[in-house]
Amino acid sequence: MANSTTSPDELERLRKELEDARAEINRLNTQLSEARRRTDVVQSIKEFRESMLERLDWKSLQQPALQLQAMLQIPVVPPRKRQAFCVALPFATLPLAYSLTLLLVWVAIFHDRTRLVMVFLVVYFGHIATDSSSERGGKPRKWLKNLWIWRHMADYFPVELRKMNPETPFPPEEVYLFGYHPHGIISVGCFINFATTATGFPELFPGLSMHLGTLGFNLKVPFFREWLLRMGIISVSASSIRHVLNCGPGSAVVIVPGGAAESLDARPGCCDLTLKRRNGFFRIALQHGANLVPVYAFGENELYEVPAISRFRLVQEWMMRWFGYTVPIYMGAGCASTAAQATPLNPVPRRHPVITIVGDPIVCERIEHPSQQQVDDLKARYIDQLKKIFDRFADQYAPSRQGDMRIVS
């Protein structure tokens, strides 16, 4: 009786709902069939792998790789060689950048009839001349700072980063200016600790965004500069440091106040620092109200052997006065095949632990125009904090030192 009173519109609606339900059931059946096929494929691969392992008497999937290496007489690279390679690679980037630049110039002048290489070089050199990235925080890339190569590089020495007092907080609401000592020949520990995440900087100082300062000349070298900028490395100029500190809470910059002058005293066992005439570092901290953080790296001066050549020292000091930088004479890692303890001008450093101790932050009151007396007072507090770090850890991490820490100039 109910069916006889159902309207045509109602019947049409029910028919459409039935068709939609059938279409949905078909779609679900199709998905179920595909899922079953995928499951069957995965199961088949798993069974095939297990049967092959059983037939070939392999205990794991790594075993065939080792057997193949043995058949082809390919030696397994030991960890120490991987570490040495990872250390040598960054030091090779600068000469490779120079070589690539010279090669492109040579090709552009003598071999490129299309002039495309010349156009590229002109555009690229123009970009270098006008690019202000090095003065505005660089172009940091997190993936590059997290690269696995830096962990192997840190393990080569090894390099370790520690707080002087583990319980000391570094609130991310503040801004920080770190000073790294001593300079060493190339400040290897500074780069590994603060330009990469290999030694755990993000875990020790959560919320801080670190930038490392270097000579502006390094950031003008073609191709080499692109790598430095993407590591978050900036120019050590005052304007560059101020820009980062003005970026807001959590901003941090690390520089090596001793500079090239301190690198001249970077010999094993030496603990001489150059700070007496360094005023700009402390003035910037006062003007921005930045927390000043002293850092001492035990072992930085032990990475290279420095021959004592008095005549060349005079040339180095002359270069310092006229150009603001100098070329140190050093000997890096030795050669195992010749049993040499050190190789002249080898940029790859020797294996020696570099233990980096970060002192407690010195809170600076924000003073827009600090007087020289205020700068000197802050410098005295900073040096006192550095001495506390040295006196507390020197016997443990520098037992063969030639003397105590001195501020020589």
Image: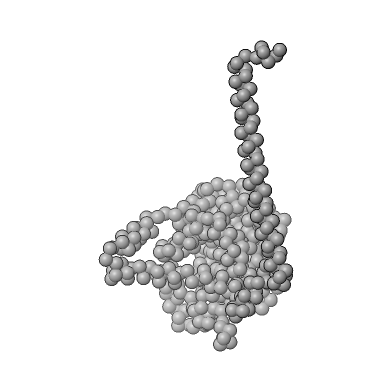
Q: Along the line of sight, which residue is nearer the eye, 31 or 145?
A: 31
Q: Along the line of sight, which residue is nearer the eye, 366 or 218?
A: 218
Residue 67 percent location from the top left of the image: 65, 75
> What residue is shown at x 68% (from left), y 62% (from top)?
48
Residue 35 percent location from the top left of the image: 65, 47
Above-or-below relation of 390 to 364: below
- Can residue 346 be seen here? yes
Quadrant where the N terminus is found in the figure? top right
Q: Along the line of sight, which residue is nearer the eye, 19 or 318?
A: 19
Q: Classify residue 404 by image quadrant.
A: bottom right
Marks counted in the figure total 0
> What residue is shown at x 69% (from left), y 76% (from top)?
399
Q: Residue furthest left?
A: 113
Residue 54 percent location from the top left of the image: 72, 69
Left or right: residue 153 versus residue 99 is right
Colour scheme shown: one colour
Q: Classify residue 373 by image quadrant.
A: bottom right
Left or right: residue 50 versus residue 122 is right
Above-or-below relation of 166 to 93: above
Above-or-below relation of 281 to 189: above
> What residue is shown at x 62% (from left), y 38% (from top)?
27
- Can residue 268 be seen here? no
Q: Along the line of sight, which residue is nearer the eye, 15 or 198?
A: 15
Left or right: residue 74 versus residue 44 is left
> What residue is shown at x 57% (from left), y 53% (from top)?
209
Residue 273 percent location from the top left of the image: 57, 69
Left or right: residue 32 versus residue 92 is right
Above-or-below relation of 222 to 18: below
